[in-house]
Image (cartoon, coloured by chain):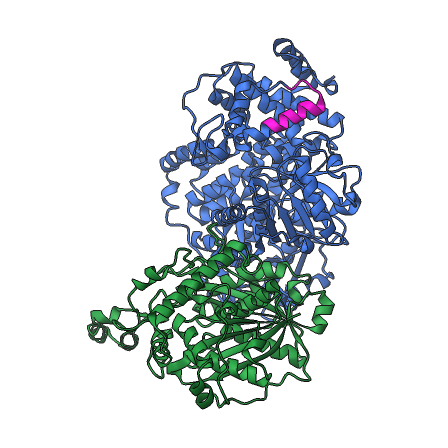
Amino acid sequence: MTGPVFSALQARALELGPFGYEPGQDSSGPWKHWQLKRDDEGIAWLLLNKADSSVNVISAEVLEELSQVLNELEADLPKALVLRSGKTGSFCVGADIKEFRHLHSETEVKDKLSHAHAVVNRLVDLRCPTVAVIHGAALGGGLELALCCDYRIAVKGATFGTPEVLLGLHPGLGGTGRLVDLISPVQAMTMMLTGKNTRDKKAKALGLVDALVQERHVANAVRAVADGKLSRRKNHWTAKLFRIDPVRRYVGKKMRSQAASKAPPEHYPAPNALIELWERHGRSGKDLLRHEVSSFARLLTSETSRNLVRVFFLREQLKGLSSVSDDIPPVKQVHVIGAGAMGGDIAGWCAIQGLRVTLFDTQPEMIAKAIGKTADLCRKKRFSSADTREVLDRLIPDFTHQGIGQADLVLEAVPEKLEIKHKVFAEVEPQLKEGAILASNTSSIPLEQLQEGLKQPERLVGVHFFNPVAQMQLVEVVKHSALNDHTYDRARQFVGQISRLPCPVSSAPGFLVNRALTPYLIEAIMMLDEGVKAESIDRVALDFGMPMGPIELADQVGLDICLGVADMLRERLDNDLPEAPQWFRDKVEQGKLGKKTGEGLYLWDKGKPKKQGQAPRAPEETLDRLILPMLNACMACLSEKVVEDEELLDGAMIFGTGFAPFRGGPMKYAHERGFGDIHQRLQQLAQLHGERFNPDAGWS
Amino acid sequence: MANDSHSTAGHRPVYLVDGARTPFLKARGRPGPFTPVDLAVQAGRPLLMRQPCAPTAFDQVILGCVNVISEEMNPARVAALRLGMGENMPAFTVQINCGSGMQSIDTAYRYIQSGSSDLILAGGAEALSHSPLLLQQRTVNWLADLQLAKGPMAKLKALSRLRLGMLKPVVGLERGLTDPIVELNMGQTAEVIAQLFGITRQQADEYAVSSHLRLAQAQKEGWLDNEVVPAIAPDGTLYPEDNGVRRDSSVEHLAKLKPVFERPYGIVTAGNSSQITDGASWMILASEEAVKKHNLTPKAVITDSHWSALDPQIMGLGPAMSIAQLLTRHNMSLEDIDLWELNEAFAVQVLACLAALDDDTFCREALGLKQRFGRIDMEKLNVDGGAVALGHPVGTSGNRIVLHLMNTLERKGLKRGIATQCIGGGQAGAMMIERL
């Protein structure tokens, strides 16, 4: 916790050597992104402070300037060089991915990258001790830059990672060779293959950093380096072992099968490319460095990487929608009404993200359960006991419904019945604080109906979360006719505050995600009805790249919810969505609702569906029968302007449903296949299976 | 008699605005789900939530706590921070043993009365189930010798001085409930005053049964709904209400219990004593200015308080002294008081206090009064049960009785009440309040 007194001194938190407390003031240097100054002892402090950016990324210009900085350092060698970030938040979060999009051919990539290697190699070769001081995140290219220094001093809280694999890549600025040389090769490969971050203590244990200190000891630690008092790391003791080719091949085989279980290599080529690179050239770091460039260039120009980079920017685009003008105050306290599966999880998530939350339910047991679940989530996220306690302290049970008046945002997550919601609103509205937002987590009721009876309907907005809240990054922000800008802006900002991605949608039936997803789920149920095995159907979707098959997904969402949404869509859109089979309705009647009740379309055990191992292959047409109705609904949403454009739609489907990311989203996939092809195929399916496949006008 | 300088004339009025407490949770032989501060947070959050002012609007936080655990030094400050009352919230902890929870109210009362504060959160928190197991003094000395020993031979020699008996822990709670001056356990002091006023086992058991039945009825009728806020442990367990109450309590049942403090002839049993319990309670005190500024709705005003002291071996009689002092100072008789909360440390101790106020010798010789006061009407005393049924988290009880008195005056539409408790070590505190 940081109160007003400590806040006033926060600008002094970073130890910046000769720059003192205010490095930003000193813009007299010759470079835009770098500042260089020597202290009394002759130690040069080099700050990376990327202009016009809140975080440091490595762009071509940043590297070009680094080359000039190195000229100066080589000409007049300092006693030691300190490299650190001038940004308070982090060291450097990676390469400037924007520039990736302008590189079209492998040769182009190779040229650029070889040039970059040449620059950083000069940092490696600098004939004075060099030390990177790292606070916050050092990711991808940022970590690779730090790896070019002789020493790394981490400040408590620092994180390290090579997330390139998430973009269908592997490190390209010398990371493969230098990381494998520095720490245990197996650990290095694991870091690069999983893309997972490594926190301070773990990084120290791995040998990724030479010292782990509090910010207040940075100056003394740097001095110790300059005086040669900090011993430099030797290669990891297992490194020698992995210079033997058969050893690497043996371990590489295991890595391949492990990587394949997480990401099928036919869709995600990067892990195998990295493993192959290491198997072939891992004899020495230098060898790896040489071959890294061409492997990276191949990956960067692959379809998968292009699509994953696209997904990266889709996320940035969605994230950008949460930044609003400064005069909109952030939400500090949230009041959630209804501690059921959604309400409870939303409340817990908000508390984890630092907001104070009051959680009301008429049943105290439900509130207690939600608090227990939040504690579990903290445990899973490996929060310290103090951090967990802080989260739980912020999550305040409200047994008597008195938390409304202090909240900046009141969110209802009560059952999907208009009368119930109207009753809640009638109680809540008079108690709302000035400027507070009234949000509804409705998934199916039109906002136009919800706002009836409200005195100030402009304060109402749909804020629609997806299940499970802690994993699904998307939140639909539902607009309606009476919504005002303040509410709309503040709602999007709120979504950003809790690290979710807002997607504005209009108040059309099912909004975007459910509208697009339901035909896919219903079609899967129709196929079950025709006698196709659940496992076989799910297999087809998994092979396509979905994180989960539609049958399992229906169970996870809850069959009651699926049925409710399907019925609502059929009624309100007056379309050809098929009626759910009677046996399906019976299941819902009997309370076999899926994961939450232990039985649905699958039997569930300890949160996992019991699937039969060997299922027969589903019919050839299965994939199109599943995917095309979804695409058709997406197209309808675009023509009806439910969502503004294809990019937002693709982003929403990826972050709201997990739609195969390497395909870049449903519309990207549709373009890839060709609208004509889709149109034709839908027509065929319509002839075979009925009018529900009739192609939307948008395809022709 | 103690000094008589507690006149309230000329001071600012001090209002009791609202209060809430956790359910009192019976200790079950191992540390319960909440530490003292956890309990304070559980009770404080809903209380602060229902106020029209922000938690940061307070001037300070005062918390009574006797058994402070080592992870929570100055529990008042830890609680204030965890309650989101702001980094700039001064907070301190008070300790006067069993009176700590009332001492916090009284201290807040004085601050506001004198004009140096306007809005104070005052509470009590105690987790008796978290009382530590201690090392014996000789074991501590042995450890010190071992650490000081230089060289392997010396270490070995020091090591060899360990005896098995030295490993037996000292139960911190037992130690805490024993008076160090007279070396009597609190239960023994109850035996002493029972004898002095002729209280019988039968009377004590009958009193205990009525405490349970009264609490059971209050729970059933929902009279505690606003006062007791459910607590939720991090594992998702809900603690909705006081769990020490025995709805099926009967004299026949209690008669079977053996005396616990003085066997075999004593009359104080586990059944007619207060229970070992965890719990926390908070009250909000405000000046006239604060009431206006924050649009608060005060329920009562504090009219006076008094602390007295006597021989530690008869500490249980303290309330009789404090009551006498308050009544005399305000020229009142027992009939002027509509409701009484007299903390039930022991059933015999409550009965002895009542007997003492009705005892000419005691009132004349010990209190210097002209005559006895008479008998407090049992229908006005501890109307919804007390610590025998609820438990007695020592640092909390004094706060709870003021809170419950305030709420009961309101529920019954009565005017004036006194809350009082005996204090281990030979003291007592009493507070007189009036409904607005």
Task: State left or right for residue B281 relative to residue A571.
Answer: left
| Quadrant where the C terminus of chain A is found in the figure | top right
| Quadrant where the N terminus of chain A is found in the figure | bottom right
Residue range of the region highlighted in magenta in the rendering: A563-577
Task: State left or right for residue B40 relative to residue A575.
Answer: left
Q: What residue is drawn where x is 72% and y is 45%?
A: A426
Q: Colour of chain B?
A: green
Q: Is residue A192 magenta?
A: no
Residue B369 seen in render: yes
Tag count in the figure? 0
Q: Is residue A62 above or below residue B8?
A: above
- Across and down, in percent, residue A531 comes to 49, 15
**Quarter assignment of residue A90:** bottom right
Residue A671 seen in render: no
Q: Is residue A564 magenta?
A: yes
Q: What residue is drawn where x is 43% and y is 45%?
A: A187
Main SS type for the magenta part? helix
- Across and down, in percent, residue B196 comes to 36, 81
- Across and down, in percent, residue A589 comes to 53, 26
Residue situated in front as seen by the camera: A517 or A193: A517
**Quarter assignment of residue A657:** top right
Q: Provide the letter of the chain coloured blue.
A: A
Residue situated in front as seen by the camera: B389 or A144: B389
Q: Name the outermost residue toward the top.
A: A687
Residue situated in front as seen by the camera: B13 or A469: B13
Residue situated in front as seen by the camera: A342 or B148: A342
Q: What residue is drawn where x is 71% and y is 25%?
A: A572
